[in-house]
Image (cartoon, grey):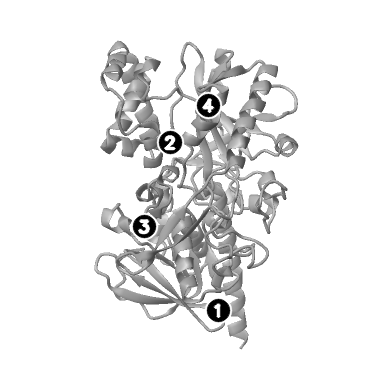
Amino acid sequence: MLIDGIQQLPDIVHPVCIVGSGPAGLACATALTRAGIPVLVLESGGKRPDRKIQELAAGELVRPELHDDLMTATARRLGGASNLWGGRSVPYDPIDFAPRDWVDARWPISHEEVMRWIPGAAVASASGAAHYRCETPLTGGAAQDFDPDAMERWVNIQAAQHIHADAIANDTLLQIRLHATCTGLEFHDDGRIRAITVADPRSGERARIRARHFVIAAGGLETTRLLLSAQCEAASRFGGPDGPLGRHYMGHVIGEIADIVLARDDLVDSFRFEVDSFGSYVRRRIALTEAAQREHKLLNTVFWPVVPPIADARHQNAILSSVYLALAFKPLGRLLTAEAIRTRHVPTSGVPIAPHLRNILTGVPSAIGFIADFLRRRYTTAERMPGFFVRNKERRFGLSYHAEHAPHADSRVTLRGSVDRLGLPQLRIDLRFTDQDFDSILRSHALLEGWLARHGIGHVEYRAPQGGRLDLLKAITAHGTHQIGLARMGDNRREAVVDGNLATFDAPNLHLATSAVLPTSSQANPTLTTIALALRLADRLSSLLARCNDDEGMA
């Protein structure tokens, strides 16, 4: 059930208290209540966005050109960041978990262990099924250098609060407190968490909550912020100031520096969004194979064709111009896609409207028909259409890449000198990309050129001459929504913040369910894997609490 505010919180020891109601928090909470365990979930915001509450996430961006705006990279409201994401649902790959001498990361658990929980994560994310291979091969024979039959799934329901609506409304073991912002952690002498302090961000009213186990599922940045704040009170906590907390900050390296010209119309059709036999939209991707990554010491990368840049009216396409104008109108654009995605397609200035209007006038019937069909498929059908892919006579498309961001200790967040209005120290965010990231992108493109030619699939045309490609790549590289690696898991507190079970080394009853625990960023969005780990955590907490109850019963 939902309760607004922190008034009349019972002075009891809750079995589990979860901070954050995003995809991981709600997945963990509902898995626990299905096991018969009462759960208290704390959400900083309300049912709808509130700018004043969202401003609690404000911090300093050392390099603002490299990081998404914090007002759109986090979400203080019921459902958390699921209200912002595009909905792509992809698991991590085996190589992401394997030791690589060119990537500074080690996982304490295996790919096979995480994949055990992916089917449940597919259900908890409303993304159809745990099936990630195209049913129709693009080429014959074994994949060499690239696998063209990798597949991404898309969610049918975007927001976590809608996926779990029945449990939120009817599960008597689930209590969600809105407008309950966690402001601090209280520690026992033995290091365990005794209680957390919370505040109503509207009134400033304070409360204290006790629990046997606490789970922080507040997103990568905000989870790290809470732990860094606790570290201020005990310098050696969570590995100390020179330890792993707040370091190895990763997102993904994404963008387009080239076009792909496909050789045949049937190849164009093979990259469309389609509903598969498991009941959600899917799309084919061209994935760098593990063998190629190892041979060339490349970072995990995938490619796929996308429509030409919609802001450039020279495409002379009525549909693309209609989409651009819809996204450029902020109130409408924010309804159609995540704000971080919208701003990547809509320059803040310098785009004349008249050429787009001329494009639309020359193709009014096609534009109207497309828009009506897209809105129907996105908002009125069981399968939520995630995007669009429009044919053109030249078969020319943007070549989009989504690549692993290498972990580096100096890509990090720390605390700045200021605090928010509830007294929590604010973050200083220094996200960095390195030569390794850029070199891997350029060499992966070069490898793809040869593979496309060998298989007669098409060819690559760069948007800058060879001497200018690195500059173009650097100019468009930025991220900030995936928030990976800041509290990585590992084997010991010198190298990691949490162990393989997501328990912090310094406080064994404090657990983290967030993308911040992932030691590598993969080519994949982190949400599905994070949900899988949250379900695994719920299973472990169920066992721990059952064992504790059995011990009490025998006492």
Instruction: Say which residue appears at 55% left-offset and 13% top-offset.
Output: 265
Q: Is residue 39 left or right of residue 144?
A: left
Tell me which label, 1 or 4, sits earlier in the chain.
Answer: 1
Image quadrant of residue 487? bottom right
**Mark 3 neighbour density, 10 Å: few (under 14) some (14–19) many (20 or more):** many
Q: Quadrant of the N terminus?
A: bottom left
| Cα gap from disc 2 to disc 1, whole angstroms | 46 Å
Percent of width and height locating residue 253: 53, 39
Name the residue carrying label 1.
Answer: 191
| Cα gap from disc 4 to disc 2, whole angstroms | 39 Å
Name the residue carrying label 3.
Answer: 57
Numbered disc 4: secondary structure:
helix
* Residue 384 marker: 2
Residue 21 visible in rendering = no
Report the amino acid beneath label 3.
Ala
**Mark 2 neighbour density, 10 Å: few (under 14) some (14–19) many (20 or more):** many
